[in-house]
Amino acid sequence: MSRRLLLLLVLCAFPGLAHAPGRLFADKPFVIARPEVSYALFGEFVTGSEHFVMSLEHATRFATPVELLVPHQQDLRDHRPAWAVVAAGLPAPSAAELAALPAPLPPGMGAIVDLNDVTPRPALFESVMRRFFWTSEPLAVVFPEGKSELWVWCPAKTRGKFGIGYGIEEGGGYMEAFSDWSFYAY
């Protein structure tokens, strides 16, 4: 039995045991409808100037990891998108982080910022879909009660694909990923 057929059989047998997949577009915020579920969201910097926004709302304070991924390909070695969680109740970012943000912080908002600038650059083998990525490494973030936004932008204005992982609890479905498979399968 081929590996692809075996993977397809496993995916069909356990359709609820996955990150909820999604595709990000810079011109339309992505709503994380179920913040208790983990998400694997993918987008692409076409010009390098895009600013991707994901919005979510928690009923109580909630801690979960966030991680940014870039396909481990030679032509993307300098592609280092950054991310931030923006919400009321978060600390004020440093002057350098504030200067790097893609937009001014709304009044009363703070931010947790990851400029994805660790050297040497960590790598990750994602064993389910069998992909190799550069990673910002997971950072546990305490999301405050209420509305939050996750921002992704590229300070160096480089172009290329990226993914952002949010959450722990599996609850999506692998079958949803097949609708945009050509985009996710680097």
Image (cartoon, rainbow, N blue to C red):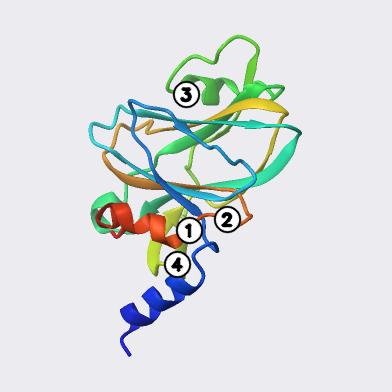
Find residue 27 and report its image quarter: top left
The Cα–Cα distance between marks 4 and 3, rounded to whole angstroms, is: 29 Å
Percent from the top left, x then y, of residue 106? 56, 12
Could you tell me which quadrant the N terminus lies in?
Answer: bottom left
Percent from the top left, x then y, of residue 35? 61, 41
Q: Residues within 10 Å of mark 4 (few under 14, many from 20)?
A: few
Residue position marked by numbered label 1 in the rendering: 173
In the foreground, 89 or 34: 34
Q: Secondary structure at mark 2?
A: loop
Residue position marked by numbered label 3 in the rendering: 101
Q: Earlier in the sequence, mark 4 or mark 2?
A: 4
Q: Amino acid at mark 4?
A: Phe
The Cα–Cα distance between marks 1 and 3, rounded to whole angstroms, is: 33 Å
Find residue 12 and report its image quarter: bottom left
Residue position marked by numbered label 4 in the rendering: 125
Could you tell me which quadrant the C terminus lies in?
Answer: bottom left
Callout 1–callout 3 Cβ contact below 8 Å: no
Residue position marked by numbered label 2 in the rendering: 171
> Do we see residue 93 in this rendering?
no
In the foreground, 123 or 164: 164
